[in-house]
Image (cartoon, helix red, strand yellow):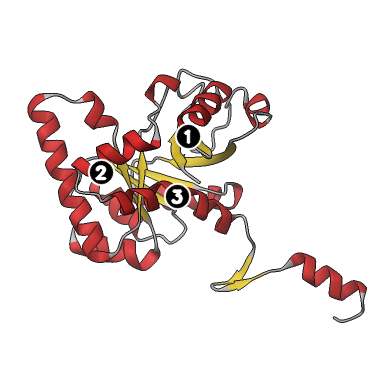
């Protein structure tokens, strides 16, 4: 069950959800997560995409903000509305805030080295770290070398502290999508083993499944069908 967890479609990208889903299915994905930016809505063509067979399509939200306070507010407002919540951390204060919030599923790190406190926060709060492969494809020369060094460092820190990883090509067009086998090969350049890459591609689907279940408290699931059955039989 391989997922591409960070898909941007019209109007945030240049392709429709249907085109993204069709190409992703052909490449070997079981599902994609289409991102709404800050819950702004306006995503086009979702009904047609949901009718495509052979691939699952989920709607997630990518939260952006200028400061930690407004980031917390947006997470609070959007968490219950979406089965998958990612934060795009464009500065280090946002990165620290996102990794310290257990309501966040995924953090997209815009080029910062993980510190030990940040790594411990990510592990404690079970926040996954995105390995965005798009710069590997687009950058050239010294910029690409610096990016590779940074990502290899963050991968080593993530492995040391047991932080979960997700791999994404961050596609904004169907032409940006990459097959799982290609993403595994690119991840290997960053020091990610095949087994780690496979887990990273499967993790979004597992998180979606967990988030769509109902929890009364940590570790306590609400089994609605069971409760209704007992009510009908006079058991409760």
| Horizontal arrangement in the rendering, residue 219 relative to residue 120 (left or right) | right
Name of the residue lying farthest toward the bottom: 235
Name the secondary structure under disc 3: helix
Category of crowding for the residue at label 1, using alpha-carbon neighbours closer than 10 angstroms: few (below 14), some (14–19), many (at least 20): some
Q: How far apart are the alpha carbons under marks 3 and 1?
A: 12 Å
Q: Nearer the viewer, mark 2 or mark 3?
A: 3
Category of crowding for the residue at label 2, using alpha-carbon neighbours closer than 10 angstroms: few (below 14), some (14–19), many (at least 20): some
Q: At x 58% / y 36%, what residue is drawn?
A: 55
Q: How far apart are the alpha carbons under marks 2 and 1?
A: 34 Å
Q: In this rendering, is residue 7 above or below 156?
A: above
Read off the residue under disc 2. 91
Query: Which numbered dot is residue 28?
Result: 1
Q: At x 39% / y 32%, what residue is drawn?
A: 179
Question: x%, y% of residue 7?
Answer: 46, 32
Question: x%, y% of residue 124?
Answer: 35, 68
Instruction: Please identify the quarter of the rendering in which residue 177 is found.
Output: top left
Is residue 66 or residue 230 the one in the foreground? Answer: 230
Read off the residue under disc 3. 202
Query: Which numbered dot is residue 182?
Result: none
Reading the chain from its start, which is encountered first: label 2 or label 1? 1
Q: Nearer the viewer, mark 3 or mark 1?
A: 1
């Amino acid at each position: 069950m391989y997922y591409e967890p960070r898909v941007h479609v019209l109007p945030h990208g240049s392709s429709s959800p249907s085109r993204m889903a069709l190409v992703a299915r052909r490449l070997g994905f079981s599902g994609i997560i289409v991102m709404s930016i800050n819950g702004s809505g306006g995503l086009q063509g979702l009904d047609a995409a949901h009718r495509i067979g052979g691939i699952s399509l989920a709607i997630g939200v990518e939260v952006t903000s200028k400061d930690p306070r407004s980031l917390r507010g947006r997470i609070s407002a959007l968490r219950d509305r979406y089965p998958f919540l990612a934060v795009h951390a464009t500065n280090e204060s946002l990165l620290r805030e996102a990794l310290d919030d257990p309501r966040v599923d995924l953090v997209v790190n815009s080029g910062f080295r993980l510190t030990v406190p940040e790594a411990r926060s990510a592990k404690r709060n079970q926040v996954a770290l995105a390995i965005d492969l798009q710069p590997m494809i687009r950058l050239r020369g010294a910029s690409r070398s610096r990016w590779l060094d940074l990502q290899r460092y963050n991968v080593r820190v993530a492995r040391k502290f047991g932080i979960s990883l997700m791999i994404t090509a961050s596609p904004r067009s169907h032409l940006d999508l990459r097959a799982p086998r290609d993403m595994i090969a690119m991840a290997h350049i960053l020091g990610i083993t095949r087994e780690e890459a496979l887990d990273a591609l499967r993790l979004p689907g597992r998180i979606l499944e967990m988030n769509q279940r109902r929890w009364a408290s940590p570790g306590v699931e609400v089994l609605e069908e069971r409760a209704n059955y007992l009510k009908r039989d006079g058991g409760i």
